[in-house]
Image (cartoon, rainbow, N blue to C red):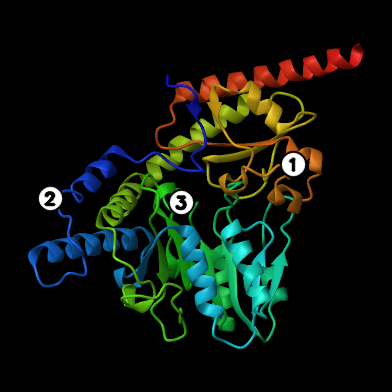
Amino acid sequence: MKKPVYLDYAATTPVDPAVADAMVAHLTLDGVFGNPASRSHAYGWQAEAAAEGARGEVAALIGADPREIVWTSGATESNNLALKGVMEGQAPGHIVTSAIEHKAVLDTCAWLETQGHQVTYLVPDAEGCITRAQVEAALTGNTRLVSLMLVNNELGVVTDVASIGAMLRERGVLFHVDAAQAAGKMPVSVSGLQVDLMSFSAHKVYGPKGVGALYVRRSPDVVVRPQIHGGGHERGMRSGTLATHQLVGMGAAFALAAEHLSVEAERLEQLRTRFLDTVLAVPGVVLNGSGAARVPGIMNLSFEGLEGEALMLGLRELAVSSGSACASASLAPSYVLKALGRSDEQAHSALRFSFGRFTTEAEVGFAAGLVAQVVVQLRNARGNRRAL
């Protein structure tokens, strides 16, 4: 068993060996290394074919037309392109989002507020859910865009996007969904969910870092203004030379995700059950978002009376996190857990455990036992100190 045991798949996933092999074949002189925009010779034609093949593989996982896939550098850029691309260049408008979105959405919304746009931040219930009724009540005559994540990156809670999407389509309001944590973990159909824009990142799906995509529904109603100007690539929405090997890697990763989706979800559910059966048997351990629909591989636990950072020190043989990777350098309590109504103490005592494709039963058994052991040891030590 390799240690520390990696249980932070929500932060990033290792590249699948099959994906790495596909990428290597698109780097050197002996492979397909050309510029996809070079249409005057075979090297460019081969690279373009590889990029378009990958575009089709990404589209297939979400039931989209390949022409609706715009390449980006990752979900952060996709979120920026979606929100800014819709709102910029227009008279001040209204956006609806939630208080537990990824910082790539929250910080973008905050910037749009400085440009004169208004933003409503919905507060989830105690389980981390945003409801259709909440969204509908927040709409105004000037609402242009709603942006919600499909799977919360700290809790694993699934938003009822299909119901919200149907309502927004009837109201003529554009709907953006951050699906970075959903792709490969649950079925995703852009038509079934009735979304207009959807963000993805390869490195959450066993692909390489530094590449992502934005789904843009082909409709005159969906206009996305570019944020990067240059050669007019990606139908004018995102200029820049395409990194063929990165795109091939993302395409291969999404194709593998489609192939293993149901089996992988079932296996992760079994691992999750085994882990929680042991850890939740320890008094004072609470699963955050426990009553909500969720993907099986992400669990957020609070440990009563303990500091999450101190607990992590006792769990050096595990690679886990105290929340979102993008906020891991902050000493502030998780804004997601605070939005759920958790106290500072409860939020500070939380750790996120996330399993993935290469997590084994032996690793889960080891991790569960170690967590239970360390929690008891820390509490006993704290009790002894108080008795002195």
The kind of secondary structure element at disc 2 is loop
Instruction: Identify the amino acid type marked 2.
Output: Leu
Query: Mark 3 and 1 residues: CB-CB less than 8 Å, in contact?
Result: no
Residue 238 appears in which quarter of the rendering?
A: bottom left
Residue 160, position as x, y percentages in the image = 59, 61
Query: Viewed as shown, does residue 129 lie left or right of 364?
Result: right
Discs 2/3, front: 2
Mark 3 or 1 closer to N-term?
3
Residue underneath mark 2: 29
Q: Report the Cα–Cα distance between label 3 and label 1.
A: 27 Å
Query: Does residue 194 show up?
Result: no
Q: Is residue 302 left or right of residue 151?
A: right
- Disc 1 target residue: 347
Residue highlighted by disc 3: 186
The amino acid marked with disc number 3 is Met
Q: Quadrant of the C terminus?
A: top right
Residue 90, position in %: x, y?
57, 87
Q: Residue at x 51, y 43 (%)?
A: 11
Give whichever of discs 2 and 1 has the lower sequence position.
2
Q: Amino acid at mark 1?
A: Ala
- Measured as percent of width and height from the top left, residue 208 is found at 36, 47
Measure the C-alpha gap from mark 2 to mark 3.
38 Å
